[in-house]
Image (cartoon, rainbow, N blue to C red):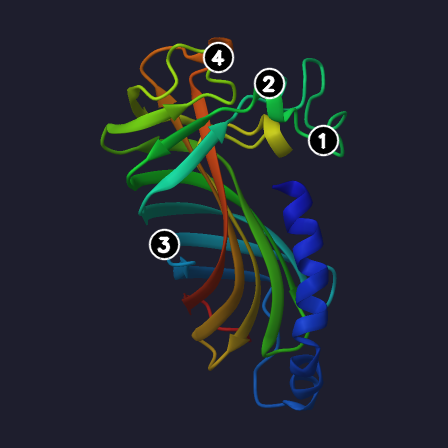
């Protein structure tokens, strides 16, 4: 997810470059504040998976101009989806033992170790503390990224079909298995992440001193843990989804 957020900001700079020109011409918004507090409601979807997220954020501007801000937030994300394939999650299996988030970042996945848990639906909720970065291109337009760091997930038990990469290797292939959302969420880097995590890359447009709209991309991890160990002694399965994001925010303290 860290690699996703860094590359995403570069794409946004290209896609939304026309907004920068318009932003520099706008002189109607007040100056940028040193501290910004927002309540934010976002919707991200790709058809088969939709998430709704409600967050409270606090950003602290750095330097004399306060253009660059760093902060934190608390985000509730609810995910709803249709039939989805969840793949083997642990980094030791996907990348190989000893290849953690840094060493194995650019190594290929070991497809022979990756099995699938096919769930007929996704329905789960997560509460996470987020890390936020924001840059004010002008008094009206911001660029930003945010990413969940740690939290917990909850939701109903699901029953799905386990599909082994090599059915000959596993007598469990084709069996129905029960699974619940992995309880603890932790950002550890790339395949080492655990649980359900949400991250966003966006362009924000200030409509007035108190309201703004955001558009961009959302990247969502959802992870389930089966009630029993399956092939290769694994019980964790993850799906990764990139979706179009739209959001509305209310700013408690207007810019000066």
User: Of helix, strand and loop, which one carries label 1?
Assistant: loop
Residue hosting label 2: 93
- The spot of residue 154 in percent (x, y) is 29, 32
Dividing the picture into quarters, in which one does residue 29 lie? bottom right
Q: Is residue 241 above or below residue 15?
A: above
- The spot of residue 225 in percent (x, y) is 38, 22
Q: Which numbered disc, 2 or 1, marks the residue that appears first in the sequence? A: 2
Neighbours of disc 3 within 10 Å: few (<14), some (14-19), many (20+): many
Q: What is the distance, in whole Å, between disc 4 and disc 3 at their CAs? A: 36 Å
Of the residues tagged 4 and 1, which is closer to the observer?
Answer: 4
Q: What is the distance, in whole Å, between disc 2 and disc 1 at their CAs? A: 12 Å
Q: Which numbered disc, 4 or 3, marks the residue that appears first in the sequence? A: 3
Neighbours of disc 4 within 10 Å: few (<14), some (14-19), many (20+): few
Neighbours of disc 1 within 10 Å: few (<14), some (14-19), many (20+): few
Q: What is the distance, in whole Å, between disc 2 and disc 4 at their CAs? A: 19 Å
Q: Which numbered disc, 2 or 4, marks the residue that appears first in the sequence? A: 2
Residue hosting label 3: 50
Of the residues tagged 3 and 2, which is closer to the observer?
Answer: 2
Residue hosting label 4: 168
Dividing the picture into quarters, in which one does residue 102 lie? top right
- The spot of residue 70 in percent (x, y) is 62, 52
Dividing the picture into quarters, in which one does residue 152 lie? top left
Residue hosting label 1: 108
Residue at the outermost front position: 168
Residue at the outermost left position: 156
């Amino acid at each position: 997810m860290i690699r996703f957020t860094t590359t995403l900001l570069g794409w946004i700079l290209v896609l939304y470059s026309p907004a920068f020109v318009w932003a520099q011409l706008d002189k109607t918004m007040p100056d940028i504040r040193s501290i910004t507090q927002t309540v934010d409601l976002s919707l991200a979807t790709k058809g088969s998976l939709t998430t709704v997220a409600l967050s409270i954020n606090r950003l602290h501007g750095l330097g004399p101009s306060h253009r660059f801000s760093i902060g934190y937030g608390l985000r509730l994300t609810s995910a709803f989806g249709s039939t989805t394939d969840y793949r083997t999650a642990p980094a030791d299996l996907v990348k190989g033992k000893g290849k953690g988030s840094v060493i194995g970042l650019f190594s290929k996945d070991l497809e022979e170790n990756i099995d699938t848990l096919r769930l007929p639906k996704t329905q789960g909720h997560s509460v996470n503390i987020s890390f936020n970065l924001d840059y004010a291109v002008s008094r009206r337009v911001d660029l930003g990224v945010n990413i969940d760091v740690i939290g917990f997930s909850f939701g109903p038990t699901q029953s799905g079909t386990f599909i082994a990469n090599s059915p000959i290797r596993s007598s469990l292939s084709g069996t129905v298995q029960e699974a619940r959302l992995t309880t603890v969420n932790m950002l550890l880097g790339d395949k080492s992440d655990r649980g359900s995590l949400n991250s966003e890359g966006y362009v924000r447009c200030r409509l007035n001193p108190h309201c703004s709209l955001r558009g961009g991309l959302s990247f969502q991890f959802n992870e389930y843990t089966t009630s029993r160990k399956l092939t290769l002694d694994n019980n964790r399965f993850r799906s990764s989804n990139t979706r179009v994001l739209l959001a509305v925010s209310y700013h408690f303290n207007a810019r000066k």
